[in-house]
Amino acid sequence: MARYEQVQGTVALITLTNPPVNALSAAVRLGITETVTRALRDPEVKSMVICGENGVFCGGADIREFAKPMSGPPLVPMIAAIEEGEKPVVAAIEGAAFGGGLELALGCHYRIAHSKARVGLPEVTLGLLPAAGGTQRLPRLIGLAPALDLITTGRHVTAQEALKLGIVDQVTDQSALDLAIQFAQQVVGQPLLPRKLSTRQTPCPPDVDGLLEETMAQVKQRARGAMAPIACVQAVRAAATLPYQAGMQKEQELMATLFHSSQARAMQYCFFAQRAVGRWSLSSGAHSGNSKPRPVSKVAVIGLGTMGRGITVALVKAGMSVLAVETNKKQLEIGKQMVSAMLKHDAQKRNATPRLDLLHFTIDLLELKNTDLIIEAVFEDMALKKQVFKELSSVCKADAFLCTNTSGLDVDELAAVTKRPELVVGMHFFAPAHVMKLLEVVHGSRSSPEAVATAMHLGKRLGKVSVLVGNCAGFVGNRMLKPYLEQANFLLEEGATPELVDGALEEFGFPMGVFKMSDLSGLDVGWRIRKEAGLTGPNVDPRDPPRRRQGRRYSPLPDLVCEQGRLGQKNGRGWYLYDKPGGRVATPDPSIHKFLEEYRIKHGISPRQIDRQEVVERCLFALINEGFRSLDDGIAAGPEDIDMIYVFGYGWPRHRGGPMFYAGMVGLPRVLTRLEHYRQAHPEVPHLEPSPLLRRLVASGSPPINKWRDFLQRPHSQL
Ligand SMILES: CCC/C=C/C(=O)SCCNC(=O)CCNC(=O)[C@H](O)C(C)(C)COP(=O)([O-])OP(=O)([O-])OC[C@H]1O[C@@H](n2cnc3c(N)ncnc32)[C@H](O)[C@@H]1OP(=O)([O-])[O-]
C-alpha cells in the first residue's frame, strides 16, 4: 500500500496507494514503515519524497479501523522514524493532508504544497485529538496561538494560509511532486536538526497562561459538552509547558480518554452518515448511482423575504447566476438592498469581491422563460403558492424544474396545479439559508428521478448536506419538531418555566433551548400556522374545551403569549425579555412567570416540581418516537437521514450523533419504557404512544442502528 521507486538517481519516492484518500490503514502504515527503512538503508538514496496517489496526499488515519482491534505498526513510531532518520524527507502535498496525513507531513523535514491543496487537523470533529504528534509538532512549528486555533476547531486551511502560517515551505501552481523531487535533491547535505520539529521550542506569547485560559473558556462555551476540544487545549498546553517526550505522553493519555468514548463514536458515525445520505434511492429503483442531474446554469428565486434572500445569497456564493423576483418595485428594491448588503458583508469577511454581477432583479415573471430551475420562496400559504406554481407552469420553459421552499406544505398538491408534476420537488432550506448546511429535498409522489438528482446536486453545489425525504406534513424535520414543541408547552403548563426547559436542553448540548429558539424564529410564525389549522382563532370548534383540540390535549399557551403582543426577539418580548427589539440577550421575564401562574390557577392545574431529566426525556423521546414513525412510514429512508437533518438543521449536538443514534446509545428498551411511563401519565397525548417500530426493535433484542432498516414496515421507503 506504499509504492517505492528511485527517481533522479538518488531520491526515494514513496507513494501512498489507498484510494480514494490514501487513508493510513494498517497496510499503508506497514508500507510506509518498510519503504522508509529501505530508503534509509540504501546508500544510493540521499533523500526521500512522500506523496499520495491520485492527487491526494492523505486523508488521515483510516476512520473505519477505529472500531476494530489495532493492527499494523502504530503511527507515532512510524512518524518518529521518518523525523529521526538522517536523510531529508520532503512531503509533496496535493489535494489534502488531513489528520494523520498532516501529522505524517509534520514528521517530514520539508513540505511542498500544491496551490489547491488543503491541510488541517480535523480530529476534533471526530471526537478525538491529533494523537500522532500533531498536538506537539504543530505548535512547535507555527506557534501556540495559531496551533490552538487549528487544533480546537479542526478547520481546513488553504495552501496559501498554510504558507503564511509556516506549515508548508513552498506552494506551487505546477506539480507539487516535481517540485518536491527537485527540492529533495537540493537539500541534501544541509543541516537536518533544525528541521526536526520535536527538537524545537514552541513559540509562545508572553502571557502563555492567559492565552490558554482564554482559549479554554472559549472552547468550553463552544463545545456545549463535547470533550474533545477541551482535551485538545490540554494537549497543546503540554507543547508549551513540557519537553517534547512528556508532551507526547500527555497527548497519548488524553487520546486514551477519548478514543473509546461514546462522543467519539457519535461523531465518527456522523462522518459516515453525512456521506451516506448522499447515496439516495427511490422505491422505483432509481438511485443516485443511476440518475443523472441535469446541468443547471440559470436559477430564479421567487420572493425576497428572509428565506428568498438567504437562498439567493447561497446561490450567488456558489457562483451561480440568479434572477430574483418580487411582486412589486418597492419589495424588489428592499430585497435588492438587503441581498447586496449580505453579499458585501460576506465577501468582506472572506476578503473577496462580492459577485453582484451574478444578480438580476425583476418584477416581470416573463423574464423567467429561459431559467433552468426556479425556487419558490413566497409566504407559507398554500393558496398563494398554488397561484405562483400555476403562473410558473405557464411562463417557464417546458423542461424547467419548479422547486418549492415550503417548510411543510403538500408538495403533491402544488405539483398538481402544474403541467409538469414530474419536474416539481421540494427544496426546504433552513434559516438563515446562506448559513445553515441542511437542505431537505422533498420527493413528491410524481417527482422524477432526474428532478431529485438535480435538486440533490444543486444542494451539494451550494455546500449543503442534502437529505432526500418523503412528502408529508412537515416532512422529516418539522414533523418531528411538533411533538418536541408540544411537550415543552405541556411542561410549562405543569409547572416548568421557559428557563428550566431551555436550561435542560442547553445542558444536553443544543445551542439554544426550545423557547429561546421560538423567540428567535418569531412566535407569530407558528401562531399563523395554528390559526390556519383551526387550532386557535375564529375557526376553533366551539365545542372544544380550552386545552383540547381535535380530540387531543392542546396547550394554548403560545397563542396566549402572541395575543399579548409578545412576538419574540423581533419586538423585544417573547418567552423572554430582550434588551431591545431585535436584541439577542434573553433575560427571564417575571411577567411570564406571573402569566403562567395565573394560567395554571385558571385551569385548575397544581404545579409540580419538574426536573431536568423529565424535560430531556419528554421533549427528546417524543421527538425520537416521531422519528421512528417517520422511518416506518417511509418518509425518512434511514436513521442516518434523520440524524443528519437534526445535526445540520436543528442544532442537535454532533457529539450525541443525532436523535436516532442517541436513542441507540441510551438503549432502545429504556426509551420504550420511559415513553410508556409518560404515556400512562398523559393518556391524552397520542404522540407519547411508543411507535410500533420501536416496539419491534426492542422485541427483536434492540439491534444496532445499521440493522434497523431490516425492521421497517415497508421494505422500501415511500420515497
Ligand atoms: C490515531 C492518531 C490520530 C489521527 C487521527 C486521524 O487522522 S482521524 C482522520 C482525520 N481525517 C479527517 O477527518 C479527514 C476525513 N476526510 C475528509 O475530510 C474528506 O474525505 C476529504 C477532504 C479527504 C476528501 O473529500 P471528498 O469530498 O473528496 O471525499 P469524501 O469525503 O466523500 O470521501 C471519499 C470516501 O473516502 C472515505 N474517507 C475519507 N476519509 C477517510 C478516512 N480518514 N478514513 C476512512 N475513510 C475515509 C469516505 O468515507 C468516502 O467513502 P465512501 O462514502 O465513498 O464509501
Image (cartoon, rainbow, N blue to C red):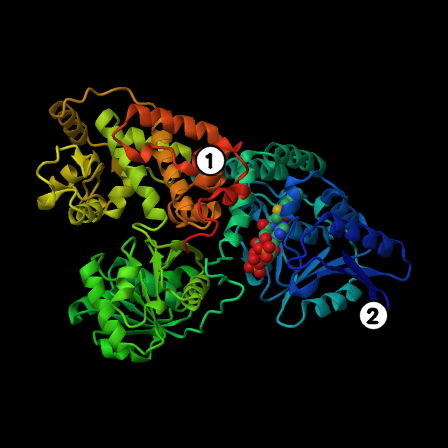
Determine contact: label 1, label 2, CB under 8 Å: no
Dot 2: element: loop
Q: Is residue 271 visible?
A: yes
Gap between marks 1 and 2, in whole Å? 65 Å
**Which of the 4 image quarters holds residue 56?**
bottom right
Give the residue at mark 2.
Answer: 8
Q: Position of residue 608 (x, y in %)?
A: 25, 19
Question: Which of these two is toward me, 367 or 535?
Answer: 535
Badge 2: few (under 14), some or many (20 or more) residues near its Cα, within 10 Å?
Answer: few
Q: Where is residue 213 in the image (x, y as percent from the top left)?
A: 49, 35
Q: Say which quadrant the N terminus sits in.
A: bottom right
Q: Which residue is drawn at 65% across and 65% down?
A: 55
Question: Which of these two is toward me, 670 or 615?
Answer: 670
Give the residue at mark 1.
Answer: 696
**Which of the 4 image quarters holds residue 510?**
top left
Decide: is 475 above or below 394: above
**Which of the 4 image quarters holds residue 461?**
bottom left
Q: Residue at x 39, y 45 (%)?
A: 630
Q: Where is residue 92 in the image (x, y as percent from the top left)?
A: 69, 62
Left or right, 141 with reference to 270:
right
Left or right, 519 with reference to 71:
left
Query: Hey, what amino acid is under mark 1?
Result: Arg
Left or right, 67 with reference to 148:
right
Query: Hey, what amino acid is under mark 2?
Result: Gln
Question: Which of these two is toward me, 123 or 275?
Answer: 275
